[in-house]
């Protein structure tokens, strides 16, 4: 009876272990599947951002150059000579000028009729554009064309264009994802192929993605779902079969109604999970030993995932310092400490966009890293600094006296202003600061940051001020501005404005040499003389 009881217990344990291993395998399979799909989504997002940034850079370069050309005499040969260097620096296949008849002259000495190109027709109407993939009239290869009108005195006088070989964008999208099995397409909102990456599983000979999907009758519902999602500018993922099962992430590029499709075969999921299935089978045979192994394995995996997630969430990828998320997490804790006064400081760099436009985004990134290092070096114990976004930084600093604190910020501004050598370039780094004192510790951190932003916005266009505090006086000023804005239209309709002329006196000639008109609401001009 005892032996029977022991055997029965053993059988129950074995069955429980087998069932447990199967359940575990199923759960872990789904977990790994979700992780792979999450990785696919992140890779798709990064690919979209890389391509979008590259296209926007090309648009910005062409727009700035077109504006520059518009300020000079339209001498095509002279302009082409200047464009030659710009052409090489930006990896263009060629650049050129098109006259109003559609005749284009290029930096590589070609003369071609471009009057039938859509980008030329849009340029005549005054619009910049980026073409889809078209065929180069000179060599029959696939290209993408950026164009911008040259406008003088409100009239289009010519068109500036720059050509990229489509292979440039293919290579840009060709990254080794999931052991080279993943690939990327860019299509327009009608499903037409724009760009296809050069990965081994990528097919570049299709014309329309919807038509390619419908070659397999089982994909009709998938093609319809994708078409509907693209029409509604949605982001998502789906599965379909084209020879083998595939997973797809789709998301808008926000350029020309283009969409980025990132695809992996479902065998990638199997590759990630087969070892786990074998492990679970061993688990059923070696029982406790396998359980112990899996417990340790799961623990290490979770620990690794946690480290990776924390590093991704809490580290700013550009500066290498703490991210805005980590800043907020630590700032909430520090602000609550009794007996310590803090201020939230939001910092903005004046006209930083010109550094990116003139010297490129990589140079701008170098400047941002340098700015962060300067800010971080000025911190004392229990003070924080992080990049908020773009050229905006956020700091949590100790404050005892307002005057001393202002002097500290002005000293910090001088350090930024005088540290202006970056990669043999010289810039003036002019910073402005918006401050919110953490007086009411019941206020949320987000509210304090918003208040600091309001203080900063109030002085962004002022030349004489670089430091602004959010206080009752500023709050009252903002309320008055809002009140005036709300009543402005009504005041116009009720003729409540009064006009004054104020003379301008020239100190050099000792004569009046002009004047300015000032408008006031009647109820605010009691201090001015009547008549």
Image (cartoon, helix red, strand yellow):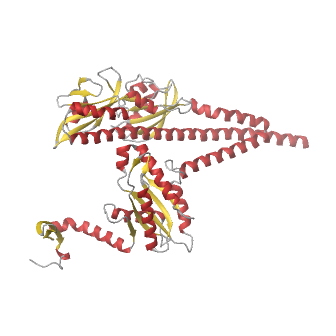
- Up the image or down, 374 lies above or below 444; here it is above
Give the residue furthest to the left.
531
Q: Residue at x 79, y 42 (%)?
A: 288
Locate the C terminus and report the quarter of the image it occupies.
bottom left
Q: As displayed, is residue 107 above or below residue 34?
A: above
Left or right of 81 in this view: 28: right
Instruction: Name the side, left or right, on which 30 lies relative to 233.
Output: right
Does residue 107 appear anywhere in the picture? yes
Percent across and percent down for residue 186 are 40, 32
The number of discs equals 0
User: In this orientation, does residue 131 appear?
Assistant: no
Q: x and y percent of residue 227 in the render?
A: 38, 34
What percent of the width, then of the height, locates residue 148?
A: 26, 37
- Residue visible at 53% across and 50% down? 320
Q: Nearer the viewer, residue 373 or 32?
A: 373
Classify residue 22 by image quadrant.
Answer: top right
Where is residue 353 shown, x and y percent of the image? 36, 49
Q: Quadrant of the N terminus?
A: top right
Left or right: residue 228 compared with residue 67: right
């Amino acid at each position: 009876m005892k032996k029977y009881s022991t055997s029965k217990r053993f059988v129950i344990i074995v069955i429980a272990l087998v069932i447990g291993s199967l359940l575990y395998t199923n759960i872990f399979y789904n977990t790994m599947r979700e992780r792979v799909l999450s990785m696919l989504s992140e890779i798709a997002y990064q690919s979209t951002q890389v391509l979008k940034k590259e296209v926007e850079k090309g648009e910005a370069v062409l727009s700035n150059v077109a504006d520059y050309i518009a300020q000079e005499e339209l001498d095509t040969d002279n302009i082409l000579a200047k464009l030659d260097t710009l052409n090489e620096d930006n990896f263009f296949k060629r650049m050129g000028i098109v006259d109003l008849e559609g005749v284009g002259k290029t930096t590589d000495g070609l003369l071609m009729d471009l009057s039938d190109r859509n980008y030329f027709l849009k340029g005549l109407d005054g619009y910049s554009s980026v073409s889809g993939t078209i065929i180069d009239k000179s060599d029959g290869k696939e290209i993408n064309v950026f164009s911008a009108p040259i406008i003088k005195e409100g009239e289009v006088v010519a068109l500036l264009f720059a050509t990229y070989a489509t292979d440039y964008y293919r290579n840009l999208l060709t990254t080794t994802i999931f052991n080279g099995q993943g690939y990327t397409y860019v299509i327009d909102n009608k499903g037409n192929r724009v760009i296809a990456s050069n990965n081994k599983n990528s097919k570049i000979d299709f014309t329309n993605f919807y038509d390619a999907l419908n070659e397999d009758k089982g994909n009709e519902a998938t093609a319809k779902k994708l078409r509907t999602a693209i029409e509604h500018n949605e982001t998502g993922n789906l599965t379909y079969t084209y020879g083998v099962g595939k997973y797809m992430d789709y998301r808008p590029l926000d350029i020309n109604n283009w969409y980025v499709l990132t695809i992996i075969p479902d065998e990638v999921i199997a590759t990630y999970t087969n070892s786990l299935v074998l492990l679970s089978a061993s688990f059923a045979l070696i029982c406790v030993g396998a359980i112990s192994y899996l417990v340790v394995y799961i623990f290490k995996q979770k620990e690794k995932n946690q480290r990776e997630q924390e590093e991704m969430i809490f580290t700013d990828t550009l500066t290498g310092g703490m991210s805005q998320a980590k800043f907020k997490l630590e700032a909430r804790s520090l602000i609550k400490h009794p007996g310590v006064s803090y201020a939230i400081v939001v910092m903005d760099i004046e006209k930083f966009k010109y550094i990116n436009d003139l010297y490129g985004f990589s140079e701008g990134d170098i400047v941002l890293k340098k700015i962060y290092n300067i800010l971080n070096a000025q911190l004392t114990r229990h003070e924080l600094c992080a990049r908020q976004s773009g050229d905006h930084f956020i700091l949590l600093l100790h404050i005892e006296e307002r005057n001393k604190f202002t002097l500290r910020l002005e000293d910090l501004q001088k350090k930024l202003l005088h540290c202006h050598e970056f990669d043999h370039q010289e810039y003036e780094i002019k910073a402005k600061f918006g401050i919110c004192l953490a007086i009411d510790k019941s206020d949320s951190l987000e509210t304090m940051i918003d208040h600091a932003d309001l203080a900063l916005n109030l002085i962004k266009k002022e030349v004489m001020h670089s430091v602004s505090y959010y206080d009752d006086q500023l709050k009252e000023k903002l309320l008055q501005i809002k009140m005036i804005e709300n009543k402005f239209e009504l005041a116009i309709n009720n003729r409540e404005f009064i006009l004054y002329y104020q003379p301008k006196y020239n100190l050099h000639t000792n004569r009046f040499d002009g004047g300015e008109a000032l408008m006031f609401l009647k109820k605010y001009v009691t201090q001015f003389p009547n008549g």
